[in-house]
């Protein structure tokens, strides 16, 4: 399904994104590209499935008051979603330029959004600072729900927050802790302070697990190297 006047704006591993007009409004066309290494029929099913999953999550978010682009059209067979274009910049791009009160406000607001989303039973699945748009008037909008799921499990919520914290640390290591603290405050305002504390504890546990795995990898690598000497 090709419509006139589309401009490529992003080429990801899974999807190509175009900017254009749909039904008179500024829109983004997210098209999942075929993967040659997959069996064609299986490939078509996977792309249709992920397209549906993303469209459902976008609509679910909207219903629950979580800021996400409005869905304008879904064509699972074509692996295409057309959604509202959100004017703004990615959180990851502006992070280096914000600090102090503005950083706190931004992350408290993000905490409230994610807290509300998790309370609605929705897990984002790829909550990095590249999947959050900051609009000109300072609102936050979540995008890229292709890996989302429905769950109320603490573990799944914790992974969402862990992924966010990790991407925060890789963009602004010096401000990550400060921002995370504000995030948890906001999360608590929506989900309750005790849930926010449980999440923080879960994230600590997930991080320890990661470290443990990395250390084991390191020591078995050292053992191999040592034996070679
Ligand atoms: N609704 C939208 N409005 C504005 N820009 C968008 C929108 N959706 C996606 N983008 C832009 O396209 C990029 C890739 O989209 P995304 O859904 O995150 O795909 P990918 O799975 O490839 O990361 C985003 O980082 C953002 O810059
Ligand atoms: Mg993305």
Image (spheres, rainbow, N blue to C red):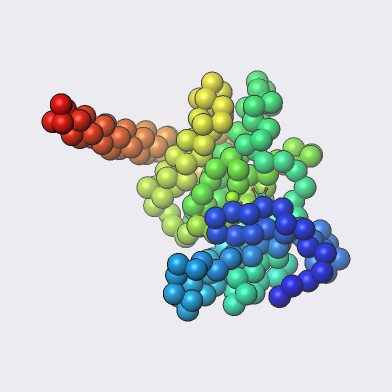
The answer to whether 226 is drawn above or below residue 11 in the figure is above
Task: Judge whether residue 66 can be spotted in this image.
Answer: no
Q: How many marks?
A: 0
State which quarter of the image contains the N terminus.
bottom right
The residue positioned 47% from the left and 41% from the top of the image is 163
Looking at the image, residue 131 sits to the left or right of residue 126; the answer is right
Task: Judge whether residue 13 can be spotted in this image.
Answer: yes
Looking at the image, residue 107 sits to the left or right of residue 173; the answer is right
x%, y% of residue 192? 50, 40
The residue positioned 41% from the left and 50% from the top of the image is 156
x%, y% of residue 31? 64, 65
x%, y% of residue 133? 68, 44
Q: Residue furthest front?
A: 229
The answer to whether 45 is drawn above or below residue 115 in the figure is below
The residue positioned 70% from the left and 63% from the top of the image is 29
Q: Residue furthest right?
A: 24
The answer to whether 95 is drawn above or below residue 191 in the figure is above
x%, y% of residue 210? 33, 37
Front residue of 187/51: it is 51
State which quarter of the image contains the C terminus.
top left
Looking at the image, residue 198 sits to the left or right of residue 69; the answer is left
The answer to whether 148 is drawn above or below residue 101 in the figure is below
The residue positioned 63% from the left and 54% from the top of the image is 11
Kindly indicate the quadrant of the structure image that contains residue 21.
Answer: bottom right
């Amino acid at each position: 399904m090709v419509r006139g006047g589309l401009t490529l704006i992003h080429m990801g591993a899974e999807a190509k994104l175009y900017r254009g007009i749909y039904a008179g409004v500024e829109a983004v066309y997210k098209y999942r590209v075929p993967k040659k290494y997959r069996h064609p029929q299986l490939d078509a099913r996977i792309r249709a499935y992920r397209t549906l999953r993303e469209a459902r999550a976008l609509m679910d978010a909207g219903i629950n008051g979580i800021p996400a682009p409005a869905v304008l059209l879904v064509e699972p067979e074509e692996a295409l979603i057309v959604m509202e274009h959100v004017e703004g910049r990615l959180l990851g791009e502006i992070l280096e330029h914000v600090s102090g009160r503005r950083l706190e406000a931004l992350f408290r607001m993000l905490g409230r959004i994610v807290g509300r989303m998790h309370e609605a039973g929705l897990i984002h699945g790829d909550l990095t600072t590249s999947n959050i748009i900051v609009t000109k008037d300072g609102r936050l909008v979540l995008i890229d729900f292709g890996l989302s799921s429905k769950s109320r499990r603490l573990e799944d919520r914790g992974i969402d927050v862990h992924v966010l914290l990790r991407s925060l640390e890789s963009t602004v290591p010096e401000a990550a802790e400060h921002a995370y603290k504000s995030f948890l405050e906001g999360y608590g305002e929506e989900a309750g302070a005790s849930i926010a504390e449980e999440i923080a504890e879960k994230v600590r546990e997930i991080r320890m697990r990661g470290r443990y795995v990395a250390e084991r990898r390191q020591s078995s690598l050292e053992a191999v190297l040592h034996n070679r000497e």
